[in-house]
Amino acid sequence: MEFVAISLLNGITYGLLLFMLSSGLTLIFSMMGILNFAHASFYMLGAYFAYQISTWVGFWPGLLVAPLLVGAVGALIERYGLRRAHRFGHVAELLFTFGLAFVVEELVHLIWGKSSVDYKIPVELDGALFTLFGTDFPIYKGFMMLVSVGMLVALYALLTRTRIGLIIQAALTKPDMVEALGHNVPRIFMLVFGGGTALAGLAGVIGGNAFITEPGMAAAVGSIVFVIVVVGGLGSLGGAFIASLLIGCIQTFSVALSISITDVFALVGITLPDGSQVARLTITQLAPVLPYLLMVAILIFRPRGLMGSRES
Amino acid sequence: MNPALLSRGRLAVWGGCLALAFALPLVLKSGFVISLLCQIGIMVVFSLSYNMLLGQTGLLSFGHAVYYGLGAFATMHLLNAIGKGGGPLTTALLPFAGGLAGLAAGVLLGYVTTRKAGTTFAMITLGIGEMVAACSLMFPAVFGGEGGVSGNRVVGKETVLGFSWGPQVEMYGLIVLWAFACTVAMFALTQTPLGRIANAVRDNPERAEFVGYDTERVRFLMVILSGFFAGIAGGLSALNYEIVTAETLNAHTSGVVLLIAFVGGIGFFYGPIIGAILVTVMQIVIGGMTHAWLLYFGLFFLFMVLVAPGGIASLIAVQRALWQAGLFRRMLPHYLAVALPVLVLLAGLVGLIELGYALLSGDAGVGAGDTATKVLGMQLHLNAPGPWLTALAVTGIGLMLTRWIGGRLGVAWNATLATLHGDKQ
Amino acid sequence: MQNPMDGVAGFKTFQYLEENSMTQSKFRNLAIAASLALMGSAAYAQVKIAYIDPLSGPFANVGEAGLKGFKEAAEILVNQKGGIMGQKLEFVGFDNKGSPQETQIQLKAAIDQGFRYVTQGNGSGAAHSLIDAVNKWNERNPDKTVLFFNYAAVDPTLTGEKCSFWHFRFDANTEMKMEAITNFMENDKKIKKVFIIGQDYAHGHQVAKAAKEMLAKKRKDVQIVGEDLHPIGRVKDFAPYIAKIKASGADTVITGNWGNDLSLLVKAAKDAGLTARFFTYYAGGLGTPQAMGASGENKVLQLTEWHMNVPTKSTEKFALDFNKKYPGVWFYYLRVNTMVEMVAKAMNTAKSTDPKAVALALEDMRFPAENGEVWMRKSDHQLMQPLYISVFAKADGKTVKHDSEGTGFGWKTVASVSQRDSQLPTACIMSRP
């Protein structure tokens, strides 16, 4: 029971952070049809910008400024790079973001060096929020949850309550129609790309000090974010939300299960021949691979994802 | 079979390439260059096999290294299993076993991945690639863990026609033979009905389906065949390096082959060959010169995507068309005129990047912020503004000149293209 | 490019003659060098060692730190003291990008450029690749042999089943390190329940196996309450692993993790208020102290051949100068210095820079290193050296005189193991030329 409660908390916190990352990617994909391979690079940029700002004026201004800066960088990249690549089709766009990820990582090396930087949790947020069954729950994790839920609410309000949000929503499903109605779709694209990358930047600001700010951080989360977007359903924010929480919890709980594949089969009455390496693998060992398994399974059995409405 | 396959011109080109490949080590005797050539040969097969998917069938795969890696591991295990029982001839034929392993993997994974094309295919291959890569470290008995699996390609003292495959240059000969055979086979495949239908499935799947072809099956077949050739490439790499590690089947290898094919040009059969040569040389030669090579490489790739999405091969093809139409002479002065400012711009950019690397990451051997540091062979004071301003000025001038002269090139280019296509305005 | 004035080694070495009190043999070497320098360019030849390690990509920071260490050690410990028979020792970086295959290409490049010595350390994969390639090269080119100095790849098999006459290791291997850790645990009766966590690859497996076998022998009463392997470099949030360790009631965690996998583990432990102690191999350097910061205080122990607060004759100054000269890179590898000095000594004793002669001179060499006397065992070419167990503690200017990587925390020795006690039997059956 204790363990379930603690794991659930851990899973939800991690899931919410994943949602911050994947929401931007989902928005971009659903609007522009671009699978932004460099999305995690913007997450990394957010962390580094926030680190830089925190060394000058502290953490709190960085929380606001860093995502905006990342968004501006994203918008510029859309305007002067991606839009050009767009003329050559989706593969070119995808490859553009693919190359961009390389370049961003190298630029980070160039500017901040190749080791990790000392991006600290602010003193106000250091410490334990409460103690549950003898395990501390850090304040910072609570803060992360707060920020991501706040972002979710703000995003929801923006999309459903404002004019621009309605246009974006309309463009999700019927871009041609929106364009025909006289809206400047390229500019909306730029806004969405900037906004999506700013969300990734925000995730970087609060994830960078919870984990470690270093040049490999983009590569570390890059593929898991794709998994979420695919599992949730391409273009579905709600799906991304559910998939984020699902994967956060799967990863947390699977770590807890020290049973091996042999045991799993034994549960249903099949005895596996002993000794093979596969049979001795435990669920814990498999934990980080499970999201990919889930993704492949989803793509085979339900290609439009949990909540998606289109197949590709 | 298409008679064009055996036309006199083509035979000459094929023969010329083969002769050139065999003649190279006679001229370039350095062991390093021969190693480089060996790697190029392997990458040619690997990237051509990749282009069977991306270029010919329109399938964007992020997990092609799986076939390459499995082929390599199969070859290595077989080499070690045969051990003393084999001989040089068996060793020479082993990459075929790698191909069969790739083919088997293609049957297994292709069945899952090829149900859908487009983004779904790309994503599934990404997922499967990640899964196989992660699993490879979990089964040290098969994949050798961190140390990988190693073997010795020289079996006993016997030789076949005087070859033991021990010296690198003999290995190079073997790679050339395999690479040539695979290239011919893959080219022949493009001329078969299957190759043609694959193109149709790429261009217009609905129509191909409507005409009566099972697109899923075509994709499946192409994945299997492409896995076969990727497996051969993997087998060659196993023999060449005599070690196979888990990294041969990870996402990085898959990414590299995608870059190679794209930079070379996916729309042309020979595109990936150009890409393999260019990228391998860049990786190893520029990588040996500067630690900023990944940045140069990334920038070059972005440049290619934005300016020449058809790859180097498309640039060559256009020039060839111009040449044949007698219009090349019209463009040549413009090319020459633009070359100078581009060189200036490049020099400025390289200067800036190298200065930055030397200052901020403390390039190997010199402390960050050292007063005098060697950059591009020059002894420079990094903390003084001089070198920076110079590099910045050169970049600025280069940029301005490139824009100006490049603009004129663009005008001339459009006019020439219009002439080429016959719609004189 | 070689500066022509630089090459006139005679001038510099004569200056040193006046400054240092010289032994007879050193004097002779210098005299030879000086006379050669006057004779012509042949004397400018340098003893060059190819450093084949990642200098770009994700592990570039580690590779660059090592290269700087080697260059500095060669300059200060060898070249400024007369060099090798008057020649300078030089390290040249070759970027293997962390890949075993690229390692072989770089080895070929180095051999092409006339290198007869290579050194490598990052990753046992690349080390296996290198040992294989060197063996094959030496077999196929007996007149141009190459020698491999390993300064950090710790897979026991490199000096065990796969040992080679052409390979020397200057770092203690996984089993020796675990022997030292478990010897310490044997006497620490507070330890009751142990949890083993590691990266799911060869190194992690070896650490887990060694820990279980040795604990079973030395402390039958200690209970191993859990063992987890996680994929290397893929776990972002270690909170669930920590929850599991906590639930198991472990008071001690043994881990072979390095880099982010270690820093994240320690951070997550602190977040959850886990009080267990962590016995580690790699908490001491290359960015990990910085990343773990206060969360490792009094909780993280490491096993190394040395740390900044082990008193030495001259390494303290060497390290402080190094840290000043290369801001952001912290001196970490004492064994690099040991290796450089031992190699120089072997060449000077053998009066040759031929790899085979140098290898023979290195075998069985005893050397007064800065961390105590070390011995290069002839049977497997594994260096035996004193080892230290230390805990991450607040720098107090006294026992913890120096902090680590500017964190305000440094290493405090809690136990040391003599060179003799770190010895383990070897499975090596070496074929000798």
Image: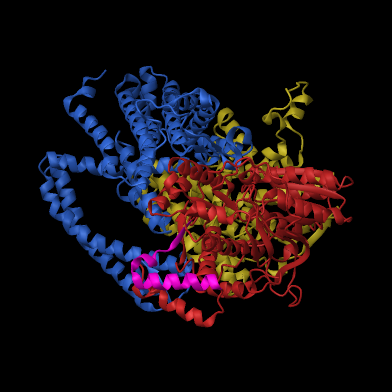
Q: Colour of chain A?
A: yellow
Residue B66 visible in image: yes
Q: Identify the residue shown where x is 35% and y is 48%.
A: B281
Q: Is residue C60 magenta?
A: no
Q: Please identify the dominant SS of the magenta region.
A: helix
**Side of C289 relative to B241 (left or right):** right
What's the residue at 47%, 72% (across, down)? C30
Q: Quadrant of the image for the N terminus of chain A? A: top right
- The residue most toward the bottom is C18
The image quadrant that residue A232 belongs to is top right
Relative height, residue C211 to residue B60 (above, below): below
Picture coordinates of residue C203, whole percent (x, y): 65, 46
Residue at 45% across, 55% down: C94
Where residue B345 appears, x then y in whole percent?
28, 63
Magenta region, residue range: C24-50
**Which residue is more in the foreground, C92 or A218?**
C92
Which sits in the foreground, C303 or A176? C303
* Residue C327 on image: x %, y %: 55, 72
Give how far across and how far down residue C1 sits, in percent.
Answer: 35, 67
Choose top left, top right, bottom left or bottom right for residue A187.
bottom left
The blue chain is B
The colour one sees for chain C in the rendered image is red
Relative to residue C209, is residue C186 depicted above or below? below
**In the image, is C310 to the left or to the right of B309?**
right
